[in-house]
Amino acid sequence: MNYKDIISNIKNKDLKNMYLFYGREYYLIENTIKVFKSTLNEGMIDFNLDVIDGKETTIDQVISSIETVPFMDEKKIVIIKDFELLKGKKKNLTDSDEKYLTEHLDNIPDTTVLVFAVYGDVDKRKSLVKKIDKKGIVFNCDKLSDMDLFKWVKKKFDINKVIIDNPQVMYFIDQEGYRDKSSEKTLSDLENEINKISSFVGKENKVTNSVIQKLSQKKVENDIFKLIDYLGERKSSNAMTILNDMIQEGESVLGIFAMVARQFKVVMQVRQLQQEGYTSKVISERLKIHPFVAGKALKQANNFSDDIIIDMLNYILESDYKIKNGLIRDTLAIEILISKYCKNKIS
């Protein structure tokens, strides 16, 4: 059964007793939880919906929630997030707890819908996972297929009331690289990009390839690489030009700070692994980053010492606090960063 069919059945209240949704696509998991909630009587939802933190709960709390009958509704929904027993961890629970719960799932009330939501992988060898699969539905919320992704992207642009033709939808998907095996992008990332493009063109206006390219994440990442390169080369005017272009194209200063900080952390990691004798290919595999990103970081490592990077990261952290608390203008904060580190010796 595919995701679309599962969601359709839930909306029609054709419900199984138990479900397990897991995987890297948090967007799909959260959407599923939202659909489950929509099946309940809104006025009685506080009585008939339990959302449990699976990292902190006890077996007694889980059993008690499962056994409680619904109040003025057909079903009670119990949602357990990141239940540690499904991930092979036993911080708060024991082997006997796992055995007890697994056996108990044979006798949960027909009025209870038990939903496990795991943000990441599960241990499929666990008897608990096998029991849920036997009695209900286990679904891996992984990346969407090509056709489903196309429909999803098209729908999101339509919701934002902008005009986009099918070739531009395909171009957007290609630019974002969501389907690349090495890509860490999620649907939430794509939605942010869709909203940025829609805001840029405005309602009832058309999205073109040039707009997509201008605002694409690939371009933003390349601009960040260039900005850091110019900092390393102490070319303040070039760095300022890149910065102004990014701001004019809709990037926030806090977002730029975050991307710069992330790249500098990668630089420190690749330098350490290189010193340990690892090749660029192995480094990219170990850090789960694109080989191009690993290569850029290795080159940038030659221009910055760890002490300078730590100093810059501290400055970014301090500036983030000041900006959010109205103590400094965001543009001034990042201009100071460029001026300060282009003036001083970097490495």
Image (spheres, rainbow, N blue to C red):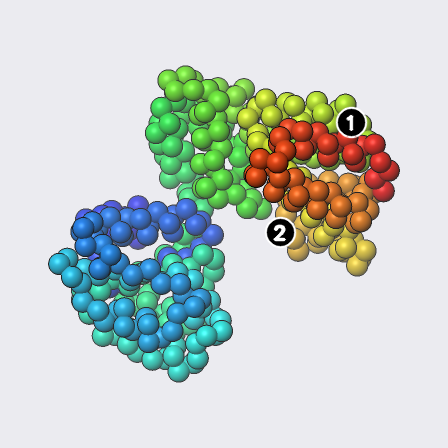
Number of numbered labels in the structure image:
2
Q: Position of residue 26 (x, y in %)?
A: 43, 50
Q: Earlier in the sequence, mark 1 or mark 2?
A: 1
Whole-percent x, y for residue 39 in the image: 21, 51
Most extreme residue toward the front is 327
Along the viewing direction, whichever of 270 and 321 lies nearer the viewer: 321
Does residue 221 sit above or below 67 in this rendering?
A: above
Please state which amino acid type lies under the numbered disc 1. Ser
Position of residue 333 relative to residue 74, above or below, is above
137 and 341: which is toward the camera: 341
Please name the residue that numbered disc 1 is placed on: 236
Residue 238 position, x and y percent, is 75, 24
**Is the residue 319 above or below the residue 202 in the image?**
below
Q: Which residue is mark 2?
A: 288
Tell me which amino acid carries mark 2: Lys
- Residue in the picture at 47% in, 35% down: 192
